[in-house]
Image (tube, rainbow, N blue to C red):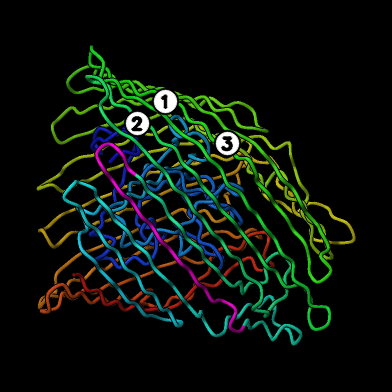
């Protein structure tokens, strides 16, 4: 793995608590998207508002947040978008899971190497290569709610040594025919039933090519999701409300040992993202479309070097620059083209960092580093980190970790302003960056026959939290604004156990006890006190293998103080390797207990609880040639 220190190392050597989700686990557990895989990580949980999926880490996920306090990477390339700083993790994530070799999850602050947004975690999705996944592998899929998906990947290494890998997919989901929301239970709003308003479409493509020291990679993804919840004051039970998200990137990188004991990495990239929201207002002759846009592209580069210096030092230093020539937010209503917002910004970011890994003794390594960042429209930030790694015995590792990180206010929080009948946003260009200070201690022990047990204690403090709150508005209109109005602190303990019983049987379990409160001592909304996960991979016989997973999320509070009940989800995935060569069949059963549960809603919703899917299934056929 490479994300923890920006160079290849084992998880034991990493100055962080690390979880690696393998390609085999993704396939055998039947994960349908990145969010389902991340939910298996200790201290992680997800929420869904029936438009996007959001990631909570160590008890922190405010309703209405856009997963902007974690940094998402694809092969080291930043994949958060530009305007909202959102990490897409649901079906909106643009890389097929069949294209992923493994997922590196680095818990704790990561700004000392990566800059902004790495408050709670850094997630690096590492794709397969042509050598790892040779040949052509088409796949077709069907499932609940009219789910239809086609996917194909191809890998090849030429005689001249060029490694090429590509993956693409098309997804089409009709969604539930009816969804009931009691907040709209009146004759004027179809008695709370949203009909045919939850459809989803997506198109993904990824390509990588490697030759010698050079790597070229790029991705294109587009996703359309209809909104059944009538968010942002839109009309209920009108399936014209939807969002469209698109991301593109291309990156050329170089990695080589240029001098003895000196390795250099350099990369240059271009990114583009677009968001287009259509929100229906009114009915009949008064029906209008509110069109909401965020368009942006940016270019940048990074150069870093690692020097294996004398006296048992390994020094990493680098700098990164990104230029954003045109970042635009726009909002208008048609017909009539009544303009509410037209804001364009040009800005740049710059960061420089250094880290030293010093092998003080054969069993003790000291690690220290810091990064300086300059963001347009924000105060300069310095993010330090420190770690003591102690291996008193060959199979025992102790990690004492300290780190600070920050999240600058994004352009949406600072400059989005909108005013219409019944709903309004107020901009706030004076928002301060959020900052976190984290203390952590971890013990990792091989207990028997490669079985790994771990326990992690942590404490963090977050200051200048940016929250979307309702403020006094004109004529009774619901008015929202982002403010630095809170602090928070969290304490927790995470237990983990991985037992590889045989080559085909393994057990993975984790439990997290956590408590997250605001500055006044109140429990945060959407913050469970208990998280649990048990996963078992096992053979059944006759070519059939099973993957079962049980996930438990403790009670959570909504924004109105309502308590949501404990969520207990049981999933089962069965994979059949047929006697026909290269043919694989799979059936996934999700929420087998058919639990009816809900996730907290954000302030953009009238609902404070958003109902989730009950029992669903998925069936796949894949052939390799």
Is the C-beta separation of discs 3 and 1 under 8 Å?
Answer: no
Label 2 and label 1: CA atoms lie apart by: 9 Å
Name the image quarter holding the C terminus: bottom left
310 up-or-down from 242: above or below:
above
The residue pinned by badge 2 equals 265
The residue pinned by badge 1 equals 318
Q: Which residue is rendered at x = 50% and y = 51% of the image?
A: 87
Is the C-beta separation of discs 3 and 2 under 8 Å?
Answer: no
Question: Who is closer to the viewer here, 483 or 323?
Answer: 323
The residue pinned by badge 3 equals 323
- Label 1 Cα crowd, 10 Å radius (few <14 / some 14-19 / many 20+): some
Label 3 and label 2: CA atoms lie apart by: 20 Å
Stretch in magenta? 195-215
211 magenta-colored = yes
* Residue placed furthest toward the right: 475
Q: Secondary structure at mark 3?
A: strand
Would you say the magenta stretch is mainly helix, strand or loop? strand
Mark sitting earlier along the chain (3/2):
2
610 magenta-colored = no
Q: Is residue 252 left or right of residue 390?
A: right
- Label 3 Cα crowd, 10 Å radius (few <14 / some 14-19 / many 20+): some
């Amino acid at each position: 793995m490479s994300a923890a220190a920006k160079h290849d190392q084992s998880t034991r050597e990493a100055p962080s608590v690390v979880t690696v989700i393998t390609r085999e686990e993704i396939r055998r557990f039947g994960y349908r998207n990145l969010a389902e895989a991340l939910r298996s990580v200790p201290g992680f949980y997800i929420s869904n508002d029936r438009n996007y999926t959001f990631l909570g880490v160590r008890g922190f996920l405010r309703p209405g947040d856009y997963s902007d306090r974690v940094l998402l990477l694809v092969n080291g390339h930043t994949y958060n978008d530009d305007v909202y700083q959102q990490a897409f993790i649901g079906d909106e994530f643009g890389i097929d899971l069949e294209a992923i070799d493994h997922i590196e999850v680095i818990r704790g602050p990561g700004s000392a190497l990566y800059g902004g947004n790495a408050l709670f975690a850094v997630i690096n999705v590492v794709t397969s290569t042509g050598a790892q996944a040779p040949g052509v592998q088409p796949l077709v899929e069907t499932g609940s709610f009219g789910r239809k998906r086609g996917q194909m990947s191809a890998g090849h290494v030429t005689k001249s040594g060029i490694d090429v890998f590509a993956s693409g997919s098309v997804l089409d989901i009709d969604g539930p025919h009816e969804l009931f929301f009691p907040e709209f239970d009146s004759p004027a709003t179809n008695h709370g039933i949203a009909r045919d308003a939850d459809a989803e479409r997506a198109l993904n493509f990824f390509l990588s090519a490697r030759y010698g020291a050079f790597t070229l990679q790029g991705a294109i993804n587009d996703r359309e999701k209809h909104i059944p919840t009538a968010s942002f004051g839109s009309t209920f039970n009108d399936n014209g409300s939807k969002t469209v998200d698109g991301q593109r990137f291309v990156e050329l990188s170089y990695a080589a040992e240029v001098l003895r004991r000196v390795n250099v990495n350099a990369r240059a990239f271009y990114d583009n993202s677009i968001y287009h929201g259509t929100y229906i207002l009114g009915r009949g002759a008064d029906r209008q479309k509110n069109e909401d846009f965020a368009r942006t592209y940016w270019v940048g580069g990074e150069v870093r070097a690692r020097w294996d210096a004398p006296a048992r030092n390994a020094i990493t230093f680098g700098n990164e620059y990104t230029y954003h020539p045109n970042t635009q937010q726009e909002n208008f209503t048609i017909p009539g083209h009544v303009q509410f917002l037209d804001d364009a910004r040009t800005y740049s970011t710059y960061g420089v960092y250094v880290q030293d890994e010093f092998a003080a003794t054969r069993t003790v390594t000291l690690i220290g580093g810091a990064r300086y960042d300059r963001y347009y429209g924000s105060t300069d930030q310095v993010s330090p980190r420190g770690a003591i790694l102690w291996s008193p015995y060959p199979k025992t590792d102790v990690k004492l970790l300290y780190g600070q990180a920050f999240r600058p206010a994004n352009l949406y929080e600072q400059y989005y302003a909108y005013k219409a009948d019944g709903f309004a946003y107020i901009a706030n260009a004076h928002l301060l960056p959020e900052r976190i200070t984290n203390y952590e201690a971890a013990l990792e022990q091989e207990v028997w026959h490669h079985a790994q047990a771990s326990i992690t204690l942590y404490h963090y403090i977050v200051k200048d939290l940016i929250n979307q709150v309702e403020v006094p508005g004109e004529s009774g209109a619901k008015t929202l604004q982002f403010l630095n109005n809170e602090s928070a602190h969290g304490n927790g303990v995470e237990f983990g156990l991985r037992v590889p019983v045989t080559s085909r049987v393994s057990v993975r379990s984790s439990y997290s006890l956590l408590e997250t409160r605001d500055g006044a001592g109140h429990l945060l909304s959407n913050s469970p006190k208990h998280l649990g996960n048990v996963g078992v991979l096992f053979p059944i016989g006759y070519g059939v293998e099973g993957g079962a997973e049980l996930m438990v999320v403790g009670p959570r509070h909504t924004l109105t103080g309502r308590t949501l009940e404990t969520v207990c989800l049981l999933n089962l995935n069965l994979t059949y390797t047929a006697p026909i060569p290269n043919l694989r069949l799979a059936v996934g059963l999700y929420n087998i207990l058919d639990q009816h549960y809900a996730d907290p809603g954000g302030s953009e919703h009238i609902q404070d609880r958003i109902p989730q899917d009950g029992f669903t299934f998925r069936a796949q056929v894949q052939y390799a040639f």
